[in-house]
Amino acid sequence: MIIKEVAIGNNSEAFIEKRFQNKTNIIFSDDNNKGKTLLMQSIVYSIGYDSIWPVGFNPKSYYFYSKISLKNIDYEFLRHGNSIIASQGGQFYLFNSITEFKYFFSKEIFELPKIPKDGEIKTVDLSLLYEIFFLGQDKRNTSNIIVKGNNNKIDFINMLYYFLGISMVIADGDLNISDLKQQKNELENKIKIEKKKISILKKNPQIANYISSVANTENFEIVKTKLNEIHNSITELSKQRNREENRRTKLIYLKSELNSLNRSLKEGKVKCADCNSTNIVFSNVDFEFDVSNKYVRDSIISSIDENIKLKREIVLEFDSLIEKEQKELKRILNTSSSPDFRNYILFEDEIRDSNEIDELVSQLKLQLLEVENKIKAINQGIEINTDLQKKSFENIVNEIARLYKTIDPKGTLEINNLFTKANETFSGSEEQEFYFSKIVALNNILSHDFPIIIDSFREGELSTSKEEKMITEFIKLDKQVILTSTLKREEYSADKYEDFNNINIIDYSSFQDSKLLQEENTSEFFEIIQKFPITI
């Protein structure tokens, strides 16, 4: 991925940066508050990051544009609020949320990692992905990820395992194997006590003769539990499928309305009853589109078509998952053909009502099965994954340590993890050295296709010698790196970065303090905006 151009603005002020090159870029100034952080956050914000903005800046008032190349294909993005328009090859795609954009990004641009989360395998959020290569200036936290949202450092590590092709075990962060075994023993003891109390109520002799949930085999209980799981899964998948189908239906209706408008415009004029204007605007939450313009209208319809296709694919995917679960349900019913089993299915509700103790034992057995499955998952994980995970983790940590010693041979930090302890503090430039080592190590181990973007890479009074070593390491990566730096006055006067070969230096010193966006840039910004079928 190569960042080619970035722009921020609205109808009164704007800024455009298109001087990036596919090498190490250093954006510097002789003072703070020149807009470097605003630019850096805008880069990733335009493609779905949950940016941390400078105090006093309101992103809802602005549009954020970026032009990015990936595998020699140029993509253009325009974000306003939580809506994003993506453009590629003259085709536009409108997304009303970052979640919608995430699935498009994964399908069309870069396949996003999938990690275990909340008992399921989920596609990672874009903000989590970007933490591999992006480091902002504010709210840095070496003991955890910076933009948490619904994620944590375990999710980040699992994402790295995905990149490295290592399968993952869903781990419960609050329980270890000892806790689970203790729970198992407690549940087994409770079941033994309750079994002694059971006396089958012969409310219906036929039911009593056929079945008691406690009298059945352990295999029967496992089958029953599996059926419940499948039923719950089908119910939840059906709900998700119906939600996506409803959204698809609304998009089809919207397309029909726009096509009707298309016909109306051909047959006569459609105008506002209040002001007689023939300008007709379609809007979502964040963007407005002048649909009286045929090109704009056709572009919106084309974008809606793509969204309808995407929703249809999602619905078909859910249909496939539901069908798979239904087949499994039929398979279990066909293989579990004993009279006891069939009559349990028939009379389950009545049995439950007839015997509270029996129900309590069933609940305890379900809890026991859940605990046993967790123990089994952890044990399988130890057998299948732990060695490879441990080795890969050590490789990353060793690379961080190597880079740290390259920058600071006399440094005293002990690098033994991707994250520090919560109460661990750094002195001087140690934090920046740690972050540099970590972000470059991840690039080296993962060999990812993203640029490295670091705002304020000299944070913490980094010495000149260490800074020069860092720049040398960045240049060695032979990829796009975008850094920002605030120079001391004497450094600026001495043309600090002129002696480096193969870097692109961009000077922001002449910009007005806290006023990166200027009215004089609006006409050029509008030229960019006019590429997209919107009005502002």
Image (cartoon, rainbow, N blue to C red):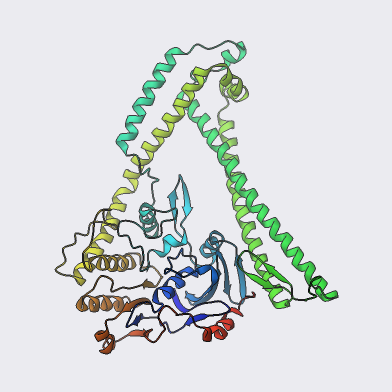
Q: Residue at x 26, y 75 (%)?
A: 470
* Quadrant (top left/top right/bottom left/bottom right) for the C terminus: bottom right
Q: Quadrant of the N terminus?
A: bottom left
The residue furthest left is 410
Between 313 and 27, the residue placed more toward the observer is 27
Q: Tell me if 118 is positioned left or right of 334 in this view.
A: left
Closest to the observer, 147 or 354: 147
Residue 59 x %, y %: 50, 69
Q: Position of residue 170 (x, y in %)?
A: 40, 45
Quadrant in the rendering for residue 455: bottom left
Vertical position of residue 533 compared to residue 381: above or below: below
Q: Quadrant of residue 32?
A: bottom left
Is residue 316 shown above or below 365?
A: below
Residue at image position (47%, 70%) is: 57
Q: Nearer the viewer, residue 400 or 375?
A: 400
* Image coordinates for residue 173, horizontal then vertical, percent: 36, 44
Q: Position of residue 96 (x, y in %)?
A: 60, 62
